[in-house]
Structure formats: C-alpha cells, structure tokens
Image: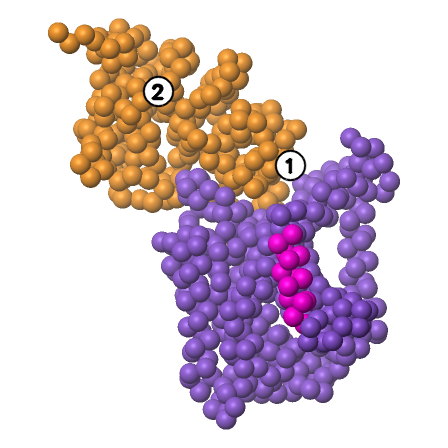
Amino acid sequence: MFYREAGDFKTSYSDDGQTFPIAFDRWRYYAVMAVAFLVIPFLINDYWEKSILMPFLVWSTVAIGLNILTGYCGQLSLGTGGFMAVGAYASYKLMTAFPELNIFFVVLLSGGITALVGVLFGLPSMRIKGFYLAVATLAAQFFLVWLFNKVPWFYNYSASGQITAPERSVFGILVTGPNAAPWATYLFALVILTGLAWVARNLTRGRVGRSWMAIRDMDIAAEIIGVNPLATKLSAFAVSSFYIGVGGALFFSVYLGAAEVGEAFGIDKSFLVLFMIIIGGLGSIFGSFAGAAFMVLLPVLLKNVLVGGLGWPTDLAAHLQMLIVGGLIVLFLILEPHGLAQLWRIAKEKLRLWPFPH
Amino acid sequence: MRDTATVEPMLDIRNITLRFGGVVAIRDISFDIRQGEIRAIIGPNGAGKSSMLNVINGFYHPQEGEIWFRGKRRGPMRPHEIARQGLARTFQNIALFKGMTTLDNIMTGRMTRMRSSMLEQALWWGRAEREENAHREKVERIIDFLEIQSIRKTPVGRLPYGLQKRVELGRALAAEPELLLLDEPMAGMNVEEKEDMSRFILDVNDEFGTTIALIEHDMGVVMDISDRVVVLDYGRKIGDGTPDEVRNNPDVIDAYLGVSHD
C-alpha cells in the first residue's frame, strides 16, 4: 500500500541516485536512526550493552570493512583477525604514548595505521587471485598474531602479555575502561559506525565503488576501460583495513577493555567475519549489518531459549548451540545463497506489488 | 564508400610478429587504420584476428614490430594506459560486469574521465556529486541512442544475449573513444539483431566520427558496412583493400573456399 515508487517522480539525477529512493524506506531509515540515537541510550543496561549492542556495533564495522574488500572488490581475505589486532595494538600504543590524544582520534589513527599494513599485505593481490590470495592473507593473520605475541614492545612489556585499555573520555564522559557507562560506550561506537557506514555507502555508489566492482566482475574488461588494477585493489585493501582497524580498536578499547592477542584476534575471528558477510550478503552494506546481527544475536537467542526457556544445563546448551548455529548457517546458505540482503530485496520486490501478485 | 586514401592513418601497424613459445600467432603483419573509417579484419578461425586486437589494446606485447598511434610510436604500455589514449573495445565473449546494472556498467565506461578524489568520493562532497550527475547525463544520451532505457536498472546478468551485446557497445561508447575495436559484435545474433547492430555501428561512425575496427564473420555485413577490409590467414596477411578488391582477390578466395593442391 505505502511501499510504492509510483507517483514519486524523480526530477533530477541526484534524486534518482539517492540511497533510499522509495519514500517509505527513507522514513523507516529516519525512524531507526532516531531510535538508535534517542531512545536506546536511555533504556540500555549492562547486559544489553555487553552481550548484544556493543558486539553488534563492533562486528558491523568490521563486516563492512571485509565486505568492501571481498564483497565489492572480490578479493578473498582471511586476515581479518590479524588486521583487527593491528587496530587494537595501534590504539593501545597511541593511548599509552599520547595520553592527551582524544580517544576519537586514537580510533581513527588506529584505522589509518591498519590501512597501511593492509596495503602492504595487499601487494600479492597483483599476482594472485581467489583461494591463493586467501592463503596469502592467512599468512598475514598468523604473522601478525605471532608478532604481537613475540615483541614485548607492543604490549609495553607487561608481565601478563595482555594489553589493558586506560580510561579515556570524550567531552569529559568516560568511554573506555571499566567505569565507562553503557550508554556512553554505546553512543561512541554508534557515532563512529554511522559515520563509517555513510562513507562506505558514498564510496560504493560512485567512481571508486564501480572500479572495485568492475575488478570483481571482470578484471580484464575493467582494465581495458581504464581501471588501474593494482591501484584499485590496493585502495580496496586500504579502505577495508581502515574499517577493520577501527573495528579492532573499538573491540579492544571500548568493548573488551583488555585483550590477549591469540585469544581475541585469532583465526576464528577471521572466519566469523567471513560468515557474517556471506550470510548477510556479499557486496551490500545492509548485508554487513544483517550478517553481524545474525551472528551476534543467534547464539544469544539460542542460549536464552535452551537455558532460560527449556532449562537445560549450561554446558550442554553451550555445545549444542555451536551445532545448531553451524547447522542453521548451512541450511540458510542452501536456501538463499545470496544472503539476507537478497532475501530483503526479494521481500521488498514483493511488497512493492502487494496485494497484486504481478 | 568514402575516399579516405588521403587521410592520415590513426593507427599504423608495422611488421608485427607475435609468438607464444614456438607458435607464431601473427607473422610480420602491417596495415593501417585511417581516421574516420570502418575497417574490418576478417579471416578463418585461428587466423590471428583476436590476437591482433589484443596487440592493439595492449594485452599482448609483440616480439617484433611497431605500433604508431596518431603519428607517435607507442612504447610498451598497460591496457589501462592505452584506454586513456582513446581506445575502447568490446569482446567476442561478452565481458560485462555481471553483478552491476546496465547504468553502472555504462557509467564505468566513463571511468577515465572522472577526476574527483577518494576523499571527495568518501564524503560525497564537492566534485563527487556534480561529476556523477554530469556523467550520468552523458550516459543517459548513450542509453537513448542504443534504445535501452527500459533496462537501465536491471543487473546485466539477467539480460538476454542481444541486449548484453548492446550494453557492452554502450560501455565502450561511454569512454568516447577515438578508435573503437569490436570483436565479433554480431556473433550469435539473428538477422534482425544483426541489422540493429549494423545500424548502431554505422550511426556511431557517422554521428560521433568514431573510427572503428571490427572483426566479423558475416561476410554480407562486412562487405556492406566497412570501408576497407584486411584479410588474415594462418597469421599472415593475404589481402587488404576495399570490399570489392578483397572479394576478387584470388588468395582470399582460396583461403575461404579452399583450393585443390594437385
């Protein structure tokens, strides 16, 4: 009924190219933003922050990053955990070396440092593609984790080998450390994610995004049209690593508070993010959010149902939960290989025609 | 037929030899493409036609010979650098960006003419949006020209073959090339689609003044629309001239109809 583009005539190319061309979509987007910024901060408590909202925000940031590289530019990467570690350790070193520096800039600078590292490990993409590149990025994953474990300078020679985030504030409000209020950490991560998601949308709709997708879909044709393959791939590595680095910095400093590299940034994290973007939808910003939500919420939901609802013992539920999540992923990929974003698109197509079948 | 004999050659190919290991794909071939003409390259399968196009747009680097473009000798260049000099092409097996819409595919053709920086793109600020709209207008003109308005926002992977060929031509045209290379633009088409495509090729040549080099197997089409024809066989050049000259060339007749060796 309301979900129509009919009667909503576009009179300029800017109007036609906007993110939400259908009025109903636009209003729903404003509503979601209003709830996220104006309602949730007043309702949030420790449980919601720690187990649902913060993981969702952090993993969404990282998933957008990997989606830019893998979903938009077609370069398969298994180094996500390692790049997150770069972001985390960069933010730790920056926070301890420059205590005066605002945490906001610390996070962005950590992203910048990760972007440089990402470009370095993206260089092999000039020569190798697909699974072979995945193996090369796997080397990055293991090398980076080993490096942060082996060189004590990175963890400031602490006896435990852990890094711990000192207290930092924005406008006098603590956002890191154990005393930070849930609403403050939530808003801090939300502001950064909103900004980055907007930038990702801008990048993917213009010249840069088209050159990424051209390389992904047909690299030979892209080259004869004038796309420089090396520069394009490296720009994807840089932007992607920036997002992943920011995500890693947020993960460590705002969410975890303390981290040990092998445990927090292991290979399992690389796969987790890859699952997120495959389930959410490759080459879709919305898909990154949907995939992150799916992977964060499903275990929480299952735990609540199994332990809270059915009264199973916690350890049994924890094991079965892994089986069920794995099974659901497989089932889901068989039913809709293009992910939640595609499901969403189909639903919207149907909704546009509703209540008429054609 | 136009008389282009006095016109400067736009592209001059001199004594090109291309080898893959021991196989000689192209043997000492020279020909030129003049400003504003439609030049056909024909020959039986495996004659080296596509290899020739790949040499012209920089995928293959010939072992011997020179390529002169607009009066200057071309050094070794990558394909994306050659594209910036004003060369565009289509492929024998359609090479579109399958995941992108028709509009995005053709917009990608204008890549070399976009100037806004990464930062402007990221913030969608300043030149980024203005440029996008200016190029969109140019692209819409091509969409009108090729009569593909209705599939503007359809992912090209879903389009039928004939339309995909048309979108690919659109993508090449979007670059506003000086020299357009078409590798079998009519392969696998029915008569009606061939007529449409021929009309588009002639219109491009007429309206935009684009020089066109094309490979095609349909002799009727080749003889009708091209100004001059070069004939290859087994990597050698066996004929070069107007359609009439080529048609009456005994070597060409031998290559196409076979000859008895007794």
**Which numbered circle lies on residue B55?**
none
**Residue occupied by mark 2:** B40
Rendered shade, chain B:
orange
Q: Position of residue B226 (x, y in %)?
A: 38, 16
Image quadrant in which you'd find residue A234: bottom left
State if disc 1 and disc 2 touch (CB < 8 Å). Answer: no
Residue B207, position as x, y percentages in the image = 49, 22
Residue B99: tell me if it is visible: yes
Who's purple, chain-wise? A
Left or right, A224 with respect to A352, comes to left
- Residue segment shown in magenta: A318-331
Residue under the point 56% across and 60% down:
A274
Q: Which residue is mark 1?
A: B153
Q: Is residue A320 magenta?
A: yes
Task: Please tell me which residue is depicted at 69% across the width and 73% down the height of the picture.
Answer: A316
State whether the magenta stretch is mostly helix, strand or loop: helix
> Of all residues shown, which one is farthest toward the left?
B262
Give the residue type that dot 2 points to.
Ala
Image quarter where the C terminus of chain A lies is: top right
B220 versus B126 height, above or below:
above
Closer to the chain start, of discs 2 and 1, is 2
Find residue B114 and report its horizontal and vertical position in percent. 51, 46
